[in-house]
Image (cartoon, grey):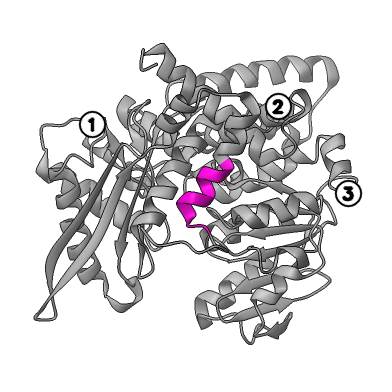
Amino acid sequence: MPKTTLTQYSFCQSLNNMVDRAVKAIGLDPRIAEAIKACNSLLQVRFPVKIKGRTQVFTGWRATHSTHRLPAKGGIRYSPKVDQDEIEAMAALMTYKCAIVDVPFGGSKGGLIIDPSKYDRDELQLITRRFTLELARKGFLSPATNVPAPDMGTGEREMSWIADTYKHLYPEDINHIACVTGKPVHHGGIQGRREATGRGVEYALQEFFRHKDAVKAARMSGGIEGKRIVVQGLGNVGYAAAKFLSETDGAKIIAVLERDGVLYNPDGIKIEALHNYMLEHKSVKGFPEAVFSKKNTAALEMECDILIPAAFEGQIHAGNAENIKAKLIAEAANGPVTYKADRILQKRHITVLPDVYVNAGGVIVSYFEWIRNLSHIRFGRMQRRYEQLRNERITTIMEDHMGTLAEGVKSDLTHGVDEIDLVRSGLEDTMRNAFQEMNGVLLSNRKVRDFRTAAFVIAVQKIARSYLDIGIY
């Protein structure tokens, strides 16, 4: 675990400090609090793979923070900067996240020290399958106990390799496809999973703006429409969130920060056009519809209504928190605001919607996928045609009394529910309920003054109740 200085906490320490605020606010028994914060188990693996005639040794981890619910759930990231402290912190974050949104999972996380851009498809497949072998043999991969998902540097492709490797290791397990989520739809995945985290960010902000008191406290008024938004990171999460918020909700994405620089357009950036440009040019530089600058991190301090950090942890820290001008921060990334920065933002009355809630969309839809895999049936398959026929009968009765309906209206009324409709409905309902619960804590407990502490109060109380129910304390 990395050493800390007087001015900086590690990711794990920063997270634990935030949890401690919630523990203090509810007066939880310190012994139970320590049990909740402790990481249950940690696996480190080192394995050789022959690449281009040379043997390379790769190092990876899988941490299981809590098994108060099974399976433990959490992504696998491929990054040259990943380390043990980061994996343990994100495993803990997953435990709290699942509790907040009422997903019955424990928390886990995995990582491999690797730069995926330096390997071709076949090499990455070889490395991933070998990593899967190490995890499965040591009991850190199973549909019943530990279920990974995509994270930074991994995606549907890697998840399908993991699922296939597990299937060959345990061919008698009829639920083998549920050993991992975030798979391609044609390989056991679920519609809406790829966009789930970004869609969840949108639903979180939609619900926030339904609560006038919360909006007023953030020194804003009205709804999302017209709000100026700065997005850091246009990966899977940032792209989806920015696209939905601008195209569906009418927000203005005035700036996009990427590794090579920042784009700015006060009238709003067309996210789909920028996304296509980045796919072609591998850079935001040169995009014709915005002004480019290399000073990307400085753009975090740009004046805006909403700042969405959707890249790495620790991007808003004690060194720049005093300069943040956003009225609301929605944490789409894991741990983008450090503990000290969080305290500074609180004193400056900048509202923060925490990562442990805002980016929970991925694990919510992963839960739907896992349930789908275990039930061995597509959602909506049994009732879609029944609902469509029933709606057609209702429409016929309406037309008998009201006259012929417009074709578009009739089509909407008779539409049978699809899997994607159910996924989005379940995701929106979960995000709305979780925000309402956080807001309720904020309004009812005088010791809780911010959404982050409210979120951890909910998580800690639910986990503590589980521990007490099974007799640990």
Nearest to N terminus: mark 3 or mark 1: 1
Q: Residue at x 38, y 57 (%)?
A: 155
Please, what is the three-letter code of the amino acid marked with disc 1?
Asn
The span from disc 1 to disc 2 (Cα, nearest Å) is 39 Å
Residue bearing mark 2 = 441
Viewport quadrant of the N terminus = bottom left
Residue bearing mark 1 = 175
Residue bearing mark 3 = 220
**Residue 15 is inside the magenta segment:** yes
Residue 308 location (% of width, % of height): 67, 58
- Horizontal side of 174 relative to 36 (left or right) equals left
Asked if the residue at tag 1 contacts the one at tag 3, i.e. Cβ–Cβ closer than 8 Å, the answer is no
Nearest to N terminus: mark 1 or mark 2: 1
Note whether residue 380 is visible: no
Q: Residue at x 69, y 28 (%)?
A: 413
Q: Secondary structure at mark 2?
A: helix
Q: Residue at x 69, y 39 (%)?
A: 451
From the viewer's perspective, is the residue at label 2 or at label 3 nearer? 2
The span from disc 2 to disc 3 (Cα, nearest Å) is 22 Å
Relative depth, front residue between 288 and 134: 134
Note whether residue 51 is visible: yes
